[in-house]
Amino acid sequence: MTPRGRRTLAYAVLLGLGLAGPALGAQLPPGFVYLSEVAPGVLQDMRYAGLDNFTGRKVPGYDAPQCILRRDVAEALAKAQAELHEQSLGLKVYDCYRPARATRAFVKWITDDAASGSKRYFPRTDKGTLHMQGYISPNSAHSRGIAVDLTLVRVPAAEQQTFDRSARYGPCNGRADARAPDNSLDMGTGFDCFDVMSQTESPAVTGEPRDMRRLLRAMMKKHGFQSYWREWWHFSFATRTPGPARDFPIEVRRAD
């Protein structure tokens, strides 16, 4: 048998034993995992893989609605999820690893007058100033796999209605029942709401939404994440080795 034949036979044996799992799905850089492998109970509503986001279209690099993170970040989320379950709560992620091409697309979108986007995501903010106001950055921790955008849900979570592109949904800073479908708790604004009400300690947000923001921030801090004061949903994992920005596309995770 030739060396190539022996390698082929060995690989076939590994497949039969279930030991070559990574080769069956999308190839990830070392240290990266699909969140569903580590914390399958965390809900995923990956907005940039669909039409319900501030650009109004699928974002480059998001070829599948899958959350990918560095393994240490995913494991920290799993611990937070387990603790929240004791309160009949859970996590839902909107964005995780973000290909660098997506970040470049966001920056280009800001200055593209022909790309109006979904105004309900920035109802009283000038689209052309989103980068200056700190909502969109050309250098994102998401591209390093250490940042995550997320919220809280009741457990078990209610069924989420399907997004209807032709519907007239209310602004992200308006009533929760008028916004686009989302089965999460009301946090005072929707995800990616580019508005001062999205600041974690916004005085305009009171009652249960304010309490849930504080609970989310406290839980994430306990498990090693730092919050971003402008956006109640954004957290970065505190690490001395953030690693380089990546640009591999998000692809479907196939079953092992």
Image (cartoon, rainbow, N blue to C red):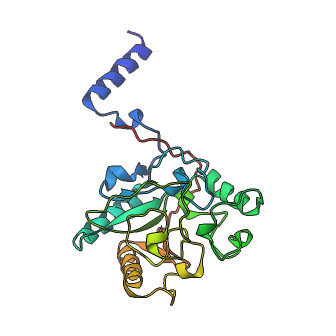
Asked whether 222 or 244 is in front, the reply is 222
Seen from the viewer's position, the closer of residues 165 and 44 is 165
Give the residue furthest to the bottom: 203
Q: Is residue 50 above or below residue 221?
A: above
Q: Is residue 16 above or below residue 63?
A: above
Can residue 229 be seen from the camera position used here? no
Specify the farthest residue to the top: 1
- In the image, residue 249 above or below residue 173: above
Question: Where residue 220 appears, x then y in whole percent?
Answer: 39, 73
81 left or right of 233?
Answer: left
Residue 166 in the image, given as x and y percentages of width and height = 56, 55
The N terminus is located in which quarter?
top left
Q: Quadrant of residue 135?
A: bottom right
Asked whether, in this view, residue 85 is left or right of residue 49, the answer is left
Can you see residue 194? yes
Displayed quadrant of residue 255: top left
User: How far across and how far down the image is residue 184, in percent?
Assistant: 38, 67
Front position in the image: 121 or 171 = 171
Question: Which residue is pictured at 40% across the width and 82% down the height?
Answer: 214
Q: Residue at x 51, y 57 (%)?
A: 47
Judging depth in this view, the residue of 234 and 172 nearest the camera is: 172
Please give the name of the residue rendered at 39% of the width and 19% of the height, measured from the top-left corner: 8
Determine the residue located farthest toward the left in the rendered image. Answer: 86
Up-down: is 246 above or below 16? below
Instruction: Specify the quadrant that holds the C terminus.
Output: top left
